[in-house]
Image: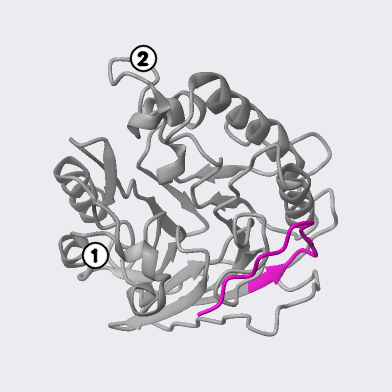
C-alpha cells in the first residue's frame, strides 16, 4: 500500500474547486511562510496553476493514548481539505527502534490501516522511529532481513526519491544516518548527495523545487530544545552535514524546505528560502502540546513562487495531558 486514493474520497468528489475553498480553524500560533523568487518561463506560456497539499508529520501511531483515534481524526480532516496530495513527513509509528518484531509489525499495520482515511495519494518520508531494531534493547540482530530501513522500504518503497506536480519538482530526502554503535544521527549520505546533485542538474532552468526531510536541515531548535535532548550519543536534532546539502541546493530555485522530527512549528528564513518545520500530528507524543505546539498538521499552498504554510489544529484532546514548555 502506498497511499492510493480510496474510492469516492478524492478532492474532486468532495467538490473542491480551488486552493482556498475549505475553511478550518487555525491555531493562534499558525505560521505563514511566503516566498517570491523569479522563475524562468517560456515567453507566452501560461502560469502553472496554484495548488494545495498537506504536510502531515510525526504521527507516532500506537495502540495506547488514543493515538489511533487521534491519527484517524487528523486524516479525516485532511480528507476534507481539498488537497491535491499529502506528504507524510516521517515517524509514522512509535516506535520501531527499540521493540521486537511483533510490536513493530503491529504498529506499522495499524498505521497503514489508519492512513486509508486520507483517501489521497500519500508521499512518504522516512523518520528515525521508522527504522526497525536499531537500538540493542530491541533484541533484533542486524542480520535480520527487515532490520533498519528495510522495515520502512517494504511498506513504502525507496527512502529518497523525487516526483513532479503542476510544475514543481519535489525532492524527498532520507535524513536518517544509521551509526555503527546501533544508534542514528541526522545525515545525508554520500550516495544520496550524489543522487541529489544529478537530479537537480537534470531539471529545466528555473524549475521550482520543494524539499522534504524528516530531520531538519535548518532549525533554531538547539537553542530551546529540552536539555535531555542535548545528551544524545549523536546529533539527533538536525542534519549534521547540512552544509553539504545546502551547497547543492544553492544554485536552484528552491521555494521551500519542509521538515519534521522536532514536533514544533517553526520557520527559519535562510537566503530567501523558508525552512518550515511542521509540528506533529501527535503533539507531545499524544500527551498534550510540545513547546507551545499542539497536535496538528501543515496546510501548504503553492501559488507561483509563493509558498504559504498554516498549521491546522484538528481538535484532538488527549486523556493524559502533560504539556512540555520551555
Left/right placement of residue 313 relative to residue 155 reads: right
Q: Magenta includes 193?
A: no
- Disc 1 residue crowd, few under 14, some 14–19, many 20+, Cα 10 Å: some
- Quadrant location of the N terminus in the rendered image: top right
Kindly indicate the quadrant of the structure image that contains residue 94.
top right
- Colouring method of the image: one colour
**Is 317 in the magenta?**
yes
Q: Tell me how far mark 2 sits from mark 1, CA to CA.
A: 34 Å
Residue 290 rendering spot, x and y as whole percentages = 57, 69
Q: Which mark is residue 83?
A: none
Q: Residue at x 73, y 56 (%)?
A: 78
Residue assigned mark 1: 249
Secondary structure, magenta segment, majority class: loop
**Residue 199 drawn above or below residue 270:** above
Q: Is residue 191 above or below residue 319?
A: above
First in residue order: circle 2 vs circle 1: 2
Q: Compared to 326, does 120 lie above or below?
A: above
Residue located beneath label 2 in the image: 145
Left or right: where 225 falls relative to 200? right
Viewer-closest of 164 and 228: 228
- Judge whether 285 appears above or below 6 on screen: below
228 left or right, relative to 303: left
Residue 173 percent coordinates (x, y)? 34, 49
Tell me if residue 263 can be seen.
yes
Disc 2 and disc 1 in contact, CB within 8 angstroms:
no
Q: Residue at x 24, y 51 (%)?
A: 233
Residue at left offset 43%, top offset 70%: 226
Q: Which residues are magenta?
A: 311-326
Determine crowd level at label 2: few under 14, some 14-19, many 20+ residues with C-alpha closer than 10 A.
Answer: few
Amino acid at each position: 500500500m502506498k497511499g492510493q486514493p480510496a474510492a469516492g474520497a478524492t478532492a474532486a468528489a468532495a467538490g473542491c474547486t480551488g486552493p482556498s475553498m475549505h475553511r478550518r480553524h487555525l491555531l493562534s500560533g499558525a505560521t505563514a511562510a511566503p516566498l517570491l523568487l523569479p522563475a524562468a518561463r517560456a515567453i507566452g506560456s501560461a502560469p502553472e496553476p496554484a495548488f494545495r497539499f498537506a504536510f502531515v508529520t510525526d504521527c507516532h501511531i500506537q495502540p495506547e493514548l488514543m493515538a489511533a483515534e487521534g491519527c484517524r481524526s487528523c486524516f479525516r480532516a485532511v480528507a476534507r481539505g481539498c488537497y491535491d496530495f499529502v506528504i507524510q513527513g516521517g515517524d509514522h509509528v512509535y516506535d520501531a527502534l527499540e521493540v521486537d518484531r511483533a510490536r513493530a509489525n503491529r504498529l506499522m499495520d495499524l498505521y497503514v490501516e489508519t492512513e486509508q482515511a486520507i483517501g489521497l495519494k500519500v508521499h512518504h518520508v522516512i523518520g528515525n522511529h521508522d527504522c526497525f531494531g536499531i537500538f540493542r534493547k530491541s533484541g533484533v540482530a542486524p542480520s535480520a532481513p527487515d532490520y533498519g530501513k528495510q522495515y520502512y522500504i517494504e511498506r513504502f518503497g525507496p527512502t529518497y526519491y523525487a516526483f513532479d506536480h503542476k510544475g514543481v519538482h519535489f525532492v524527498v530526502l532520507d535524513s536518517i544516518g544509521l551509526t555503527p554503535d546501533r544508534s542514528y544521527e541526522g545525515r545525508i549520505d554520500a550516495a544520496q548527495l550524489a543522487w541529489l546533485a544529478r537530479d537537480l542538474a537534470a531539471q529545466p532552468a528555473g524549475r521550482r523545487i520543494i524539499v522534504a526531510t524528516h530531520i531538519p536541515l535548518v532549525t533554531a531548535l538547539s537553542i530551546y530544545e529540552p536539555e535531555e535532548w542535548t545528551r544524545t550519543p549523536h546529533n539527533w536534532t538536525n542534519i549534521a552535514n547540512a552544509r553539504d546539502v545546502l551547497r547543492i541546493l544553492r544554485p536552484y530555485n528552491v521555494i521551500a524546505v519542509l521538515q519534521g522530527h522536532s514536533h514544533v512549528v517553526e520557520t527559519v528564513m535562510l537566503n530567501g528560502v523558508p525552512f518550515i518545520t511542521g509540528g506533529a500530528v501527535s503533539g507531545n507524543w499524544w500527551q498534550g502540546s510540545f513547546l507551545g505546539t499542539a497536535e496538528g498538521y501543515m496546510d501548504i499552498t503553492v501559488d507561483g513562487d509563493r509558498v504559504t504554510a498554516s498549521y491546522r489544529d484538528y481538535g484532538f484532546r488527549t486523556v493524559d495531558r502533560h504539556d512540555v514548555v520551555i
